[in-house]
Structures are given as C-alpha cells and as structure tokens.
Image (cartoon, coloured by chain):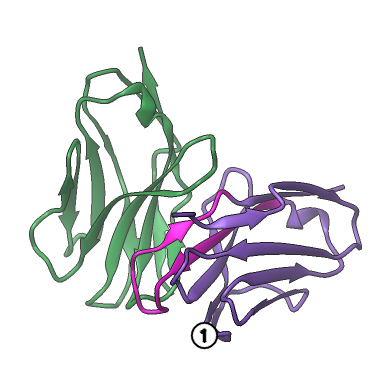
Amino acid sequence: AQTVTQSQPEMSVQEAETVTLSCTYDTSENNYYLFWYKQPPSRQMILVIRQEAYKQQNATENRFSVNFQKAAKSFSLKISDSQLGDTAMYFCAFMKDGQNFVFGPGTRLSVLP
Amino acid sequence: DAGVTQSPTHLIKTRGQHVTLRCSPISGHKSVSWYQQVLGQGPQFIFQYYEKEERGRGNFPDRFSARQFPNYSSELNVNALLLGDSALYLCASRTYSGNTEAFFGQGTRLTVV
C-alpha cells in the first residue's frame, strides 16, 4: 500500500517570501501521479499542481513549482512571492493509474502580513 | 458551469442513527468518489463509482455504503453512526474513472453526538 508523509504540520511565511513544503511517499509502482492540493477554510480541495512520475521535468504553475526526486520518493512544493490568499492547508497526494487518491496528513500554511 | 455540489453542507446526528449524504458531479462527469476527512487529518478514500458500478472501496466497515444513479449523482449512506464518524465528507468528480483530474465539492460536515 502507498503512504504519503508530510513532516511539517505547520509552517508560516512572510508575505512576498518563498516557502517550501515537504512531502515523501512510499510506493513500489513505477508509473503514478503526484499532486498538491490546497484546502482553504471554505473546505473545497483545489488542485495546485500535478506531476507525472514518468516526466523528469519538474512541474510549474505560475508561483508554484515542485522538486520531484523520484529515486528519493520526494515531492516538495515551492511557493514563491507568497500571498495572503495562500493561507490554507496543503495536502500532498499520490495516485496510481487514475485510481483513488492517497493523501498525506497535511501542512497548515500561514502567510503573515 | 456548476461545480460539484454536495448536500447538506452541515448536519448533526445522534449515535446509532442513519445518514445519507448526496453529491452531484460536474455535468458530463461519470465518476464519483467519496472521501472522509477527520479533523486534523488528510482525506481517506471510501468509495469510487463509475457508470453506476462500484470501482473501488477503501478500508471502511460495512456500515458505509454508496450508490450512483443514472444521472451520475451519488449517495453515501452510513448506518449505526458512531462518534468517530464525525468528519468532513468530500465528493470528487471525474470524467471517467481513469482520469487523474478530479474536482472536489465543498463537503458535508457531519457531527455525531
């Protein structure tokens, strides 16, 4: 069974600064997908970024980028130019071949003015 | 276009009662998945349905059941409620079961007293 670990329960960052959230996972699969989801107080899970394991190039979406290290089974999220609206819970998730998500326990990020 | 809608948004039930939660996927989406998110944890997979058939089941007791209707909406039923069933129940919608792109509803907050 796959597991996802997020070792930082809480983090804070000053507005406009850069922050990196950590995620490690355990799987014996070779083809899979990794995700970062954001859950603001509104509770709705919002996709931040997605990475296909067969792609070596790290995914980027505007201020969000990942550092995907397949051999180390590491998938960190970097948020640049942090904004107050980035305050939320962030979940790292694993998916194999369109099956169900396996989520980590989450990191609560606070962006401070 | 309407997103994934879940109803009700909140409800309170007594131990031993039964509850039905509802989810309407995005128009054109044929796959619905249910997740349980206990406070302070990441979502845990309960069920996936596609084309009205169960395609996956997580590690939940038989008190949990679900179904999908011809219009692709879905119900999650929980019998003999326990205090530990108190959680946010999330519904995720996909075009088909193998698609990795999922959209989440805002969830139903269930409190069992």
Q: Residue at x 29, y 61 (%)?
A: A34
Q: Would you say B110 lies left or right of B106 here? A: right
Colour for chain B in the figure: purple
Q: Residue B50 in the image: state x and y as whole percent.
A: 50, 82
Q: Residue A40 in the image: state x and y as whole percent.
A: 47, 37
Q: Residue B21 in the image: state x and y as whole percent.
A: 71, 62
Q: Would you say A62 lies left or right of A42 here? A: left
Protein chain holding label 1: B
Q: How many marks?
A: 1
Task: Locate the C terminus of chain A and report the quarter of the image it occupies.
Answer: top left
Q: Residue at x 40, y 73 (%)?
A: B95
The reply to whether the magenta stretch includes residue B88 is yes
Boundaries of the magenta span = B87-106
Pick out the residue farthest to the front: B1
Give the residue type that dot 1 points to.
Answer: Glu
For residue B17, above or below residue A59 = below
Q: Residue at x 19, y 30 (%)?
A: A80
Structural crowding at the residue carrying mark 1, measured as other residues with C-alpha within 10 Å and reported as few (<14), some (14–19) or many (≥20): some
- The answer to which quarter of the image holds residue A74 is bottom left
Q: Residue A14 in the image: state x and y as whole percent.
A: 30, 17
Pick out the residue farthest to the top: A113
**Secondary structure type for disc 1:** loop
Name the residue carrying label 1.
Answer: B51
For residue B44, above or below residue A31 = above
Q: Which chain is green?
A: A
